[in-house]
Image (spheres, grey):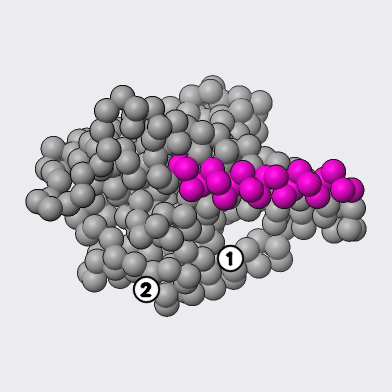
Amino acid sequence: MAGVVLLFLLGLALMVKGGDSFVDGARWIARVTGIPPFVVAATVVSLGTTMPELLVSVLAAAQGSGAMALGNAVGSVSCNTGLVLGISLLCMPGTVEVRPLREKGALLLFAVISLLVFGIDRRLVWGEGVFLLLLLLLFLKNDLDHTRRAAFLPGEDQPERGAHAAAVYLGKFLLGAAGLAAGARLLVDNGCILARLMGVPESVVALTLVALGTSLPELVTTLTALAKGEASLSVGNIIGANFLDLTVVPAASAFVGGGILPMEAPRAQIDLLAALVLLALTLLPAWKRARFHRWQGATLLAFYGSYVALLFRTA
């Protein structure tokens, strides 16, 4: 029992320290390259935090569990937006770069709508997977466009440069990512053991600790970025992670699953509609005012809580 508690606390410490180093490294990358923090977060950072979901979904599809692969991806989008971003905005609302948010947000909403349309025949075929990957190329092209337009403003503090600085901050970035992944695993595995020792039912453990565990890297990264005054990094991470979940994960899962990914009806449509509503609640108000508000965080949490309650009742 004591060993489990110690491993649980070690996982928590790794998550906190890993998130701190990860954000420091990402912030340095953004400043030394001149790429907007939102763009760095939506690509490099989000790839690091989304890798566990990608691997789980692809392995599930390869083993014939296509419905689980899609459910994991879409469920991660809802959790990232409703829970992770909801908590973050409720605690620390902030401003954000409007132009990349509008452009990437529009692509993200289009990706959800595309999956809803593809799900009409209850499956995702390889051609539709190729279409999703083309959306990813548009997303990356948008990154390149913003990179070309980016430049340091006069008077802005210049980042440390040179081989030593690169080694330090890239090391922070990579070690931070590893700390997030290892910490999340320790936290979830030992949290589940503790819950079972205390008599918590297996179903409750699966729908709470395990589900939260897949989104812990995004949660810690987002809160750390907000605490450091990097709202664009925090939101960009969520936008990028969600886009990868809605394009790369379904496409890769369809390819390894023999060219077809089952989309169970009506569950897949309900999950996608929930994700669409959560994303709309996040993006549309921010497009107009260039900032996020506490009421958005409260609304996201309330909607996500209602959605999870519905899942419990219909399980």
Q: Nearer the viewer, residue 17 or 124?
A: 17
285 sits left or right of 90 in the view: left
Can residue 146 be seen in the rendering of this structure? no
Amino acid type, residue under disc 1 in the picture: Tyr
Q: Which residue is drawn at 77% across and 57% down?
A: 204
Q: In the image, what residue occupies the spot 39% across and 57% down? A: 228
Residue that appears at 65% across and 61% down: 311
Give the residue type at disc 2. Answer: His
Location of residue 201 by image quarter:
bottom right
Element class at badge 2: loop
Disc 1 secondary structure class: helix
Q: Nearer the viewer, mark 1 or mark 2?
A: 2
Instruction: Residue 181 in the image: state x and y as whole percent.
Output: 59, 38
Magenta span has 11? yes
Which residue is at 74% across, 48% downward?
8
- Give the prevailing secondary structure in the magenta stretch: helix
Quarter of the image where one finds residue 127 = top left
Q: Furthest residue to the bottom?
A: 295
Residues rendered magenta in the picture:
1-22
Where is residue 18? Give x, y as percent: 54, 43
Residue 285 or residue 270, whichever sits in front: 285
Residues at marks 1 and 2, CA–CA distance in whole angstroms: 22 Å
> Which image quarter holds the C terminus?
bottom right
Q: Which of marks 1 and 2 is nearer the N terminus?
A: 2
Whether residue 15 appears in magenta in the rendering, the answer is yes
Q: Residue furthest left?
A: 154
Disc ID at residue 293: 2
Q: Where is 54 relative to 91, above or below?
A: above
Task: Residue under label 1, please give it.
Answer: 307
